Image (tube, coloured by chain):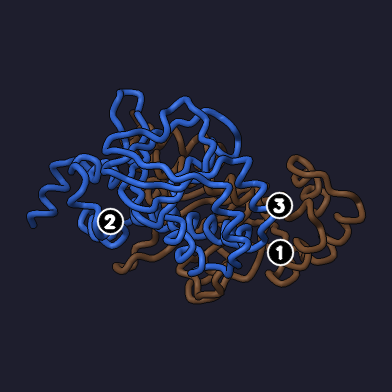
Chain colours: A blue, B brown
Amino acid sequence: MFSKFKSYLNQFVEISDDEFDIICKAGVERHLRKSQSLLHDGEVWNYNCFIVSGCFRLYRFGEDGTDHTMRFGIENWWMTDQESYNQGTPSEYNIEALAKSTVLLWKKDSWQKLIATVPALKLFEEGLQARAYEASQQRIYSLISGSAEEKYLTFQKTYPNVFNKVPLYMVASYLGMSRETLSRIRKG
Amino acid sequence: MFSKFKSYLNQFVEISDDEFDIICKAGVERHLRKSQSLLHDGEVWNYNCFIVSGCFRLYRFGEDGTDHTMRFGIENWWMTDQESYNQGTPSEYNIEALAKSTVLLWKKDSWQKLIATVPALKLFEEGLQARAYEASQQRIYSLISGSAEEKYLTFQKTYPNVFNKVPLYMVASYLGMSRETLSRIRKG
């Protein structure tokens, strides 16, 4: 599992075998069954979580009890609630596996030590955060500017293999539209 | 103008007088009239830009020529296209002053040198980026989950003094709704 992570990391930064050993020893592998949770709202999110395989979603309940899908997570992505992680505050989000999944987990304090020990990992993390911010700007632009059709096409590009794995209502809530609108577009 | 910036910075990190001198000498003050541009799409955004006074918006043209307001910028905020800045690619955005404004500008290479010289500034920047990412997550949540009324209330909290300074259509496009819907809410 860690070898997949090494190939992934090497796309972005150069990590020596010794450095990679240190990174591996600080993390754990965890297997989840479908519908198993990694985070419940009210808990503090205290992990760095890399998805080796499977599929996740991060969602939040509105005041009326409706759940809103903030994002999905697939192979080679990270799942996090950065606000809870950074500030140590209870999360407003939930993270659940949408299929049988495998993740690598590092506790926050172990990760901080790694970052201080392995400069390439610090560099990787800065790049990851920049890409996450840029992706969120693209998502905001799509949400304020796009037609329902354009939003759906953007979703398909972002998550090419997710649509057939998850219920329609989750995709509709990710796109901020009703199930009826999404069904109409897919048929059209 | 730099003294206002010092008070601002000191809210987040401790900067010594000597360090602050170095920061000031690397930057310039610039005054803009209403409607003056700081960035046109197609240009590379190469600055760190702190708003001392005034009001800005960052917007982008859709394929049909409609302009979409990504965000506003007010006193003590930063304006940036982070993607163009990080990657050195032509920006898809425009930044214009919506009122007579004053900014402090640091060129990217000067700023990088400051970051390497003043550890507190590096720390400040990391915090700023984390807050910007968190704010973008809140905005995405508001866009996918909120009613038009809730989106408008969130806007008023985020930009308490902006509404009366900018045309209605800019606020409507920021909120991803039609002018008619926004007018109806404001009257309601």
Of discs 1 and 2, which sits in the foreground?
2
Q: Are marks 2 and 3 on the same chain?
A: no
Residue linked to disc 2: A155
Viewer-nearest residue: B179 or A45: A45
**Mark 3: amino acid:** Val
Viewer-nearest residue: B54 or A181: A181
- Position of the C terminus of chain A, as image quadrant, is bottom left
Marks 1/3: CA–CA distance: 10 Å
The chain that hosts pointer 1 is B
Q: Residues within 10 Å of mark 2 (few under 14, many from 20)?
A: some
Question: Quick one: SS at disc 1?
Answer: strand
Q: Which mark is residue B105?
A: 1
Q: Are marks 2 and 3 in contact (CB under 8 Å)?
A: no
Q: Residues within 10 Å of mark 3 (few under 14, many from 20)?
A: many
Identify the residue at image location x=34%, y=65%: B62
Residue at the right extreme, as displayed: B18
Q: Are marks 1 and 3 on the same chain?
A: yes
